[in-house]
Amino acid sequence: MTITPTPSAEVAAALDAGQPVVALESTILAHGLPAPTNRTAATELEEVVRAHGAVPATIAVLDGVPRIGLGPDELDRVCGTPMAKLSARDLGVAAGLGLDGATTVAATAALAAAAGIDVFATGGLGGVHRGARETWDVSADLGALATTPVLVVCSGVKSILDVGATLEVLETHSVPVLGFGTDAFPGFYRRDSGHPVPWRVDTPAQAAAVWNAHRGFAGAGMVLAQPVPEADELDAVLHDRLLADGLALVAERGISGKDVTPALLEHFHTASGGASLATNVALVRANVALAAQVAAALA
Ligand code: PSU
Ligand code: MN
């Protein structure tokens, strides 16, 4: 039993032909967005990739097989059947036991890189949780980026995290962080997390040039952080209230470990009456479009 990333026919053909391919994660579908929004988003995100001339490769583990590129029935399964949330450490377990699972940024990056795909789009990267000094809750996404040569296009890290500490850990791991059209590190639902970005690029061609230089030399991944479109940004007062209530709720219910992120996202979506959901989908859509443009510039 080994972990063998298995591309769909379409993805395999695109990789063979040197066409641009963009990896998409499945945890956002299975654990980040509620049904039925997750299923419509899954199709829409793939369409956005295609509209920009690249081939989408949504990644998940089905029956223990790491699948690179999913068809409609497989997307139905990821969006409609409860399945495990798999980080990088869980891939061997899922493969060895023949399980289904949705892959996080860490697991998706590892499988994408193994399949020969190095551009990946998501919503928000995992990071250092607030209170990590006591809980030690630091997402494996950060360690994966340290050792996996994949460009991750995201809207920064979720504002539920300790953003400053997350940026410090990325620096420790020698992961470059670039703002796309911004000097401020984006805060997921909000355009500005309050922290600056170390570097800025303004075009997909510039991002591609930086990634091309970096990947030829270093083993680490890179973060290209794009703020949510202005029209879709969550209201600041609403955001701060959702965050405070969500953090209190998680503490009250004793939620910990890998359940924290889905629980907080769920609180945001229900308590905002869907406003944060619209923001979440909009920012992923924009990131997917940018990732496809960068992949096209690299191809
Ligand atoms: N971005 C989103 N929604 C999500 C996630 C990212 O817009 O649900 C997921 C990603 O899969 C990321 C994970 O890897 O949240 C982080 O989880 P944790 O904090 O448990 O490492
Ligand atoms: Mn965690």
Image (tube, rainbow, N blue to C red):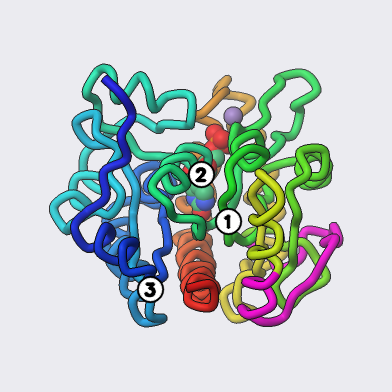
Residue 212 visible to an observer of this rendering: yes
The span shown in magenta is 189-209
Name the residue located 13 percent from the left edge and 52 percent from the top edge: 73
Left-right relation of 283 to 24: right
Expressed as whole percent of the image width and height from the top left, the position of residue 44 reads: 32, 70
Looking at the picture, which amino acid does disc 2 mark? Val
Labelled pair 2, 3 in contact (Cβ < 8 Å): no
Q: Give the image quarter of residue 190.
A: bottom right
Tag 3 or tag 2, which sits nearer the N-term?
3
Residue 246 counted in the magenta span: no
**Cα–Cα gap, marks 2 and 1:** 9 Å
The residue tagged 3 is 54
| Label pair 2/1, CB-CB below 8 angstroms | yes
> Which amino acid lies under the numbered mark 3 shown in the image of this protein?
Ala
**Quarter of the image that includes the N terminus:** top left
Cβ at disc 2 under 8 Å from ligand 1: yes
Residue 115, given in percent of the width and then of the height, sits at 38, 47
| Helix, strand or loop under label 3 | loop
Between circles 2 and 3, the one closer to the viewer is: 3
Q: Residues within 10 Å of mark 3 (few under 14, many from 20)?
A: many
Residue position marked by numbered label 2 in the rendering:
105
Which quarter of the rendered image does ligand 2 occupy?
top right
Closer to the camera in the image, 11 or 262: 11
